[in-house]
Image: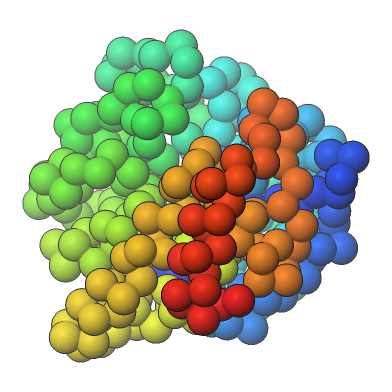
Amino acid sequence: MFTGSMVAIVTPMNSDGSVNEEKFRELVEFQIENGTDVIVPCGTTGESTTLDYEEHDRVIKACIEQANGRVPVVAGTGSNSTAEAIEISRHAKEMGADGLLLVSPYYNKPSQEGLYQHYKTVAEAVALPQILYNVPGRTGMNMLAETTIRLAEIDNIVAIKEASGDVTQASTILSRAGDKIDVLSGDDFLTLPLMAVGGKGVISVSANIVPREVKNMVVAIQEGRWDDARKMHLDMLELHKSMFIDSNPVPAKTALELIGKAEKHVRLPLVDMQPATYQAMKDVLKRYNLI
């Protein structure tokens, strides 16, 4: 249902920390102009954890309005509270989101049964297509393949964004439930391997900076042009790695400022890059002729 090159879009901010809606709309337009298939606002890269309810709704609404039906909008509505995830998800549905991205509950580290019940409860409460999001590095626990396979039986759970870094885990999901749930890469540097075993696309951080290049690689894979795709994958690898030389989305926002697309402001507890890391980012962007 949601396939191809998808962007986990940043939330631009002003120097006082307020959301810069005008710049956000420009970034949505930049993505659409460069072929991005799906826009995903208010995920981890969108600093969802520091947006209040009103800001969260405002960003999702602005994305839906700016996209204006040209591409689907999958709203990040996850929380470590099931009730809160349902509330945010209902708001997104009311505003016209096409789907939801739901991160596994963070910090409280539920059991696998707790994860299953969490996602099942949200799916039953909000009638929208839903993408599960497994990112152990952020949540503190891994959702096992067996849990995802159980959840695949629920009709409106349509995909999982796998950011576990484990291709075997993704392969297990595909081998046992690939006809019921799509697997999407949550790590740019694993898009090619995951799509090679049957993944349907990527929810990308790097696409904030190079949306056309990410799209071109995904299309090459979809068309079976493996030599082309492999070359693009290897060519972009250093750029993908640079997006995580500091806490996401600090590198992405810094890169956007350096290429002239948005200012780099982030909210505490995130802070700007230290001088050495900032220089390393500049060096990478220069090597890619982006600045």
- Asked whether the viewer can see residue 3, the reply is no
Q: Position of residue 253 (x, y in %)?
A: 64, 54
Q: Residue at x 53, y 21 (%)?
A: 80
Looking at the image, is 244 positioned above or below residue 89?
Answer: below
Q: Horizontally, is 275 left or right of 172 in the view?
A: right
Q: Position of residue 197 (x, y in %)?
A: 14, 62
Residue 104 picture quarter: top left
Q: Residue at x 57, y 82 (%)?
A: 34
- Along the line of sight, the residue nearer the viewer: 135 or 149: 135
Q: Position of residue 142 (x, y in %)?
A: 29, 27
- Along the line of sight, the residue nearer the viewer: 202 or 159: 202
Residue 172 picture quarter: top left
Looking at the image, is 276 positioned above or below residue 239?
Answer: above
- Along the line of sight, the residue nearer the viewer: 277 or 135: 277
- Asked whether the viewer can see residue 281, the reply is yes
Looking at the image, is 46 positioned above or below residue 259?
Answer: above
Q: Residue at x 57, y 27 (%)?
A: 79
Q: Position of residue 237 (x, y in %)?
A: 32, 65
